[in-house]
Image (spheres, grey):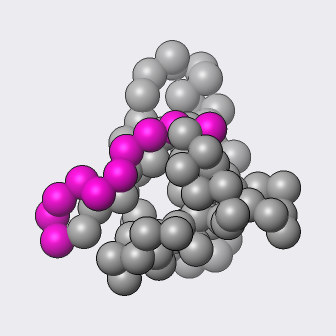
Amino acid sequence: MGLDLATRDDLKGFLPALVREYGRTLLVSTHDMGLAQAIGDVFVFLKAGRVVWWGDREALQARFPGLDRNTAQLPLEEVFHHFMRGERP
C-alpha cells in the first residue's frame, strides 16, 4: 500500500479492529515495514516473485535473534533488507 502518513496511522488502528470484530484474516501487501510490524501476525517475504521466508512474529525473531538486540520490537526493516540483498544473518 502506498499511503500518506495520516491514512497509514489510521489503518494501524482500523485494520486490527476490523479483524477482531469480524474474526477474519486480512492480507496486506506492503513495502512499509512499520505498517506491517504494527498490524501483522504472520509475515511473508517475497523476492523476485518467490517466497523466501514465511512465519509468525516469534518464528521470525527466532530466525533472526541478533536483529532484536536493540529494540523491544521486531525490526522488520532490517530483516526485509537482509532478504532483498540475499544475505543470511
Residue 76 x %, y %: 58, 64
Q: Quadrant of residue 9?
A: bottom right
In the rendered view, does 72 fall on the left or right side of 3?
A: right
Q: Nearer the viewer, residue 37 or 47?
A: 47
Residue at coordinates 59% horizontally, 57% vertically from top-left? Answer: 64
Work out whether 21 lies above or below 42: above
Give the residue at the far left of this rendering.
49
Residue 3 visible in image: yes
**On the rendered image, what quadrant is the N terminus found in?**
bottom left
Residue 81 x %, y %: 47, 78
Residue 11 visible in image: no
Work out whether 41 lies above or below 8: above
Give the magenta range: 48-58
Q: Nearer the viewer, residue 22 or 73?
A: 73
Chief secondary structure of the magenta portion: strand
Give the residue at the far bottom of this rendering.
85
Residue 29 x %, y %: 36, 57
Find out whether residue 53 is within the magenta segment. Answer: yes
